[in-house]
Image (cartoon, rainbow, N blue to C red):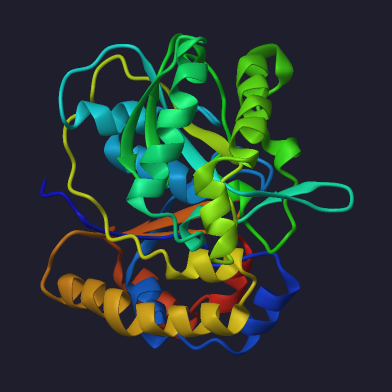
C-alpha cells in the first residue's frame, strides 16, 4: 500500500474562551468537504496536563516512535538520521525566564531573536558545567542544542509547546522534572542563571532592548534502541499553534482560513485523484485521525445529508 499523504494540524482547537468564540463563526469549506468524504479512525484521548501534546504524539506515531508521555525520543531520533549513535539524548533550548509575582514564565524561544554567535557563546560558557554532570552539548541551531548523557534515559520532560502555551499562563516550575529524577538539571539551571546574569551576551542583548538568555529547557529526552523505518514527513503547519500560544485568536482564525485554502485544498485534490490520504486534527488534549475507508451507499448518503458540525468536532479536541 502506498504511504498516505498526511496532513497533521496542531492546535486545530483550544479550550480557551477566545477560541470557542472564534469557532462559532469559523467557516472552512475545504475541511468540511474532507470530513464528509473521510472516516474517523484512530482517536487519541489525553489531558491538557500531559507532557507530550497531542500533535507530538501523532507525529511520533507517524514516524513509528514510542509515545510514552514526556519520553518521545525526539533528540535521539534526530541524531539517528545523521549517523548511528548510542546513548540517551535530549534537546537543550536556551531561553528567557521572566519572574512574575508568584510564578515564572518562559518567553517563546523563537521570539527572542537569538543569533548563532550569541547561542554559541552561551553554549561555550555553560558547557563545562554540563560536562561535570556527564552531559555533552553540541550546537544544532540558535535555540536548540543536542545533549547526550545517561540522565536523559527514562527521564520524562515537558514539550516546549506545553510550557509556552498561553501568554503568561504557564508556570515553568509545574512542568519541570521532579527533583528525584531531574535534580542535577535543576541545579544546572540555577548555576546557569547566576553565570549568565553578567555574561557579555546578556549585557549586549539588554543594550539592544532584548531579553537576556538566563536559563534553558530540556525536552525530547530518551534513548532509541533502533531507529524506525524512514517515513516521509507529514505536512504540519504550525501557524495555528503559534497564534494560540500568543492567544491571538484573530491570527488563529486567519491561519485556519489560510490552511483551508492551501493545505486542505491540496489534500482534497489528492483525494480526488484517488490517492491515499490521512488527516489528523489535534487540540490541547486529544487528536482525531481521518482516512479513506470503504463505505456503502447508505453511509455515503448519511454523511452528505447529516454532516457533523465542524465546531462540535473541533471542540472535542
Q: 154 or 246, which is in the foreground?
A: 246
Instruction: Say which residue appears at 40% left-offset and 30% top-offset.
Output: 124
Instruction: Say which residue appears at 30% left-offset and 72% top-offset.
Output: 297
Measured as percent of width and height from the top left, residue 98 is found at 72, 51
Instruction: Say which residue appears at 15% left-offset and 49% top-offset.
Output: 3
Measured as percent of width and height from the top left, residue 55 is found at 46, 50
**Position of 278 compared to 240: left or right?**
left
Q: Is residue 44 visible?
A: no
Residue situated furthest right in the rendering: 101
**Position of 263 compared to 1: left or right?**
right
**Position of 42 compared to 211: left or right?**
left
Q: Vertical placement of 150 versus 91: above or below?
A: above
Measured as percent of width and height from the top left, residue 89 is found at 39, 22
Q: 62 or 110, which is in the foreground?
A: 110
Q: Is residue 205 visible?
A: yes
Measured as percent of width and height from the top left, residue 36 is found at 38, 75
Q: How many marks?
A: 0
Amino acid at each position: 500500500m502506498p504511504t498516505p499523504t498526511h496532513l497533521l494540524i496542531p492546535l486545530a482547537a483550544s479550550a480557551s474562551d477566545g477560541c470557542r468564540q472564534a469557532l462559532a463563526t469559523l467557516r472552512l469549506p475545504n475541511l468540511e468537504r474532507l470530513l464528509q468524504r473521510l472516516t474517523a479512525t484512530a482517536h487519541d484521548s489525553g489531558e491538557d496536563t500531559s507532557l507530550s501534546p497531542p500533535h507530538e504524539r501523532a507525529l511520533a506515531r507517524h514516524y513509528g516512535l514510542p509515545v510514552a508521555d514526556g519520553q518521545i525520543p525526539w533528540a535521539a531520533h534526530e541524531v539517528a538520521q545523521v549517523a548511528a549513535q548510542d546513548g540517551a539524548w535530549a534537546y537543550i533550548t536556551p531561553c528567557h525566564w521572566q519572574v512574575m509575582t508568584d510564578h515564572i514564565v518562559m518567553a517563546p524561544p523563537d521570539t527572542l531573536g537569538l543569533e548563532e554567535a550569541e547561542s554559541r557563546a552561551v553554549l561555550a560558557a555553560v558547557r563545562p558545567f554540563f560536562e561535570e554532570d556527564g552531559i555533552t552539548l553540541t550546537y544544532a541551531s540558535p535555540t536548540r542544542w543536542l545533549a547526550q548523557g545517561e540522565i536523559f534515559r527514562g527521564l520524562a520532560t515537558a514539550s516546549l509547546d506545553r510550557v509556552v502555551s498561553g501568554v503568561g499562563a504557564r508556570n515553568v516550575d509545574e512542568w519541570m522534572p521532579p527533583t528525584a529524577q531531574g535534580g542535577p538539571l535543576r541545579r544546572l539551571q540555577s548555576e546557569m542563571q547566576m553565570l549568565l546574569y553578567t555574561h557579555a551576551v546578556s549585557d549586549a542583548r539588554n543594550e539592544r532592548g532584548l531579553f537576556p538568555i538566563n536559563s534553558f529547557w530540556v525536552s525530547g529526552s530518551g534513548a532509541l534502541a533502533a531507529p524506525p523505518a524512514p517515513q516521509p514527513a507529514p505536512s504540519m503547519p504550525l501557524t495555528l499553534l503559534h497564534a494560540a500560544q500568543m492567544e491571538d485568536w484573530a491570527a488563529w482564525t486567519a491561519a485556519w482560513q489560510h490552511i483551508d485554502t492551501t493545505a486542505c485544498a491540496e489534500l482534497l485534490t489528492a483525494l480526488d485523484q484517488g490517492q491515499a490520504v490521512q488527516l489528523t486534527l489535534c487540540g490541547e488534549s486529544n487528536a482525531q485521525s481521518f482516512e479513506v475507508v470503504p463505505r456503502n451507499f447508505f453511509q455515503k448518503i448519511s454523511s452528505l445529508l447529516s454532516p457533523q458540525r465542524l465546531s462540535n468536532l473541533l471542540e472535542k479536541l
